[in-house]
Amino acid sequence: MKKRELRLVLFLSIFLTPILFASSLSGWGRKPPPEPKTIEEKIARKFHIEHSIVLALQEKGYETEEIIKILILATATGKAADDISILREEGMDWEAIVKWYGVEMSTLSKETQRFLSEVGGVKEEEEEEEEEITEEEEPEIEPEIEKELRRKLEMEKTESDELR
């Protein structure tokens, strides 16, 4: 009799748990959201905002760094990103905007750099300089096809010279 009771309890726990506790197990069978592919998607995910907000700022002509600054200030002050972008569009520089909201410029700069490195928006200056140096130093490498064609032409030349 105990085996039968144990089987019944096991059966009920396995099959009824998802039904009885559906709200706590709501993640079962769901796929996680896809990983963001573009910088804009990464920024939107980091700031927990709609992707369209980032795209709207981009359409206004803001670069990645400025978008991040706007979103940092919006998060810190509780204001809408549009409110901050309006100040920028009216000609205020970042120092004046930061002062307006009572935030330190150094804090904004540090946070901006941190977010840029997290979303992969900007390379470090040293990396860019290294890339420039290596690009200048590297000689042009002949594509393999051109090398092969040159070899064939030389072989044909030597064969034709030998036949004469």
Image (cartoon, grey):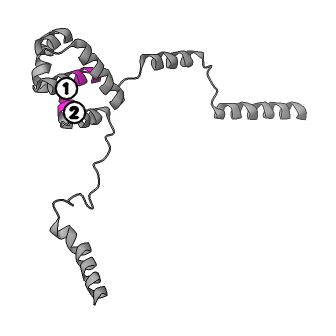
- On screen, 31 above or below 49? below
Q: CA distance from mark 2 to mark 1?
A: 7 Å
Residue on which disc 2 sits: 47
Disc 2 marks which amino acid?
A: Phe
Please report contact status of discs 2 and 1: CB closer than 8 Å, yes or no: yes
- Count of marks, rendered view: 2
Residue on which disc 1 sits: 71
The answer to whether residue 65 is magenta is: yes
Q: Name the residue nearer the viewer: 120 or 56.
A: 120
- Within 10 angstroms of label 2, few (less than 14), some, or many (20 or more) residues? some
Q: Name the residue nearer the viewer: 134 or 114.
A: 114
Residue at 27% in and 36% down: 41
Q: Residue 111, which numbered label?
A: none
114 left or right of 50? right
The answer to whether residue 137 is magenta is: no
- Region rendered in magenta: 53-69
Residue 15: image x %, image y %? 24, 74
Element carrying mark 1: helix
Q: Main secondary structure of the magenta part?
A: helix
- Within 10 angstroms of label 1, few (less than 14), some, or many (20 or more) residues? many
Residue at 28% in and 77% down: 10
Q: Quadrant of the C terminus?
A: top right
Residue at 59% in and 16% down: 137
